[in-house]
Image: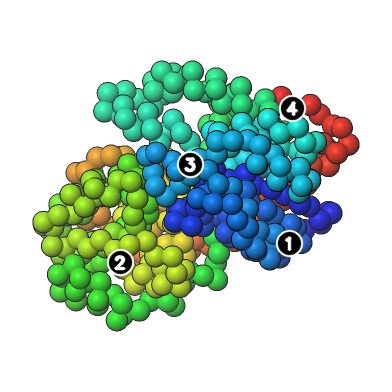
Amino acid sequence: MGGRRMRIVDVAEFYSPTGGGVRTYIDRKLEVAEQLGHELFVIAPGPEDRFESRRSGGVIWVRAPRLPFDANYYMFWDAAPVHKHLDALAPDLVEASSPWRGAWVVAGWRGRAARAMFMHADPVAIYPQRWFGGVASPERVDRWFEWFWRYLRSLRRHFDTTVAGGHWLAKRFEQHGLGPVAGIPLGIDRAAFSPDFRDPALRARLLEACGMPQDAKLALAVGRFHPEKRWPMVIEATVKASKATPIGLVVVGDGIDRARVRRAAAGQPNVHLIPPIRDRPLLAAHLASADVLVHGCDSETFGLLPAEAMASGLPLVGPDRGGFADLAQPESAEIYRSGDTNAAAAALLRLLARDPAQLRTAALQAAAGVRPDVDHFAELFEHYRTIADRALAGGEARP
């Protein structure tokens, strides 16, 4: 990457050691920042004030209250400690990686650095479109929640740029007046995932844990136990499909929706729940050793886990909306109507009826179209350099 070395600070409201995709993304960003010659510091709320050194900079934990509805996370409250750290770091650019309290803390800082808002999620799709999906179209729900889009537009005026992790999501935000939005598609760590990590012994243990014979199909579901992931629906659909062909389902994760997930799995001998897998090589072995990844979330920005599954040679079954649908290819995936249990079960049976070798080959070919994550971060940092240079030169005012 050309250009000068930068110091970037990410005020990351939802960064947590026990978090999901945001944690994985930011940890990788810290690694790649060092490779590309930048300093990156993360300011995150936590149970105590402390500093965690990383080669590119580090994580600054600011003591904060726990988030009431999710014990994995804490919430920024007092802006002063964050502003003090920003003053001391004197960054070239400050990124807010959520549109909530953290973004307003960044907006209220009096420093001269450029400011970027990275939209890791689509809040309207995650919550109201899911809540009201049975009675209204997504477009109608968007209209009902115009007040929220006004909120985002008001917040956007305090930032020099808005970034989304995919072109389709950038267009969606632009349609609601947040533009221009820089669509910078995410990527995957290609070296970490491969069919070569297939482990027959691991596969045998997982099928045994599901009470299934060794010639049964092994389905995998991976992600936070959160309502947006729709794991109870995934479990019900897989159990329904298993009436027609032997399928063992391993669900990997934990989170605030654990009670509903456990109820859905209770009494289903072919469903096995295991805790989140933090060890990346072990996760890669699970992906490479399964027959299909079953996905339920229709509000993702990109679909990082499905992309990693494809790079492992694993075909996919998932919903027809969101980052998954944007990523999946018909040669290696089956799509179903979002939230429809019967349609998900039928899609799973369609995929398992196809030739496994052809599916794996097609999954690898589809994964080849997903760029390495180093390329994503290189483009992101280059965009940030342009924005920071413009702010340094006293360029365009914020919208």
Q: Residue 179: percent from the left, percent from the top?
A: 64, 29
How dense is the environment of label 3, judged by Cα within 10 Å: few (below 14), some, or many (20 and up)?
some
For mark 1, what is the residue? 36
Q: Are marks 2 and 3 in contact (CB under 8 Å)?
A: no
Q: Residue at x 42, y 76 (%)?
A: 197
**Looking at the figure, which quarter contains the C terminus?**
top right
Q: Say what amino acid the circle numbered 1 marks.
A: Leu
Earlier residue among tags 2 and 4: 2
Q: Say what amino acid the circle numbered 2 marks.
A: Asp
Give the camera-side residue of 115 and 48. 48
Spatial CA span between label 1 and label 3:
35 Å
Q: Residue 90: percent from the left, percent from the top?
A: 79, 46
Q: Say what amino acid the circle numbered 4 marks.
A: Arg
Q: Secondary structure at mark 1?
A: loop
Q: Residue at x 65, y 63 (%)?
A: 53
For mark 4, what is the residue? 398
Q: Residue at x 48, y 41 (%)?
A: 65
Q: Is residue 193 above or below residue 300?
A: below
Q: Residue at x 88, y 36 (%)?
A: 393
Q: Residue 262: percent from the left, percent from the top?
A: 21, 52
Q: Secondary structure at mark 4?
A: loop
Q: Residue 113: percent from the left, percent from the top?
A: 78, 39
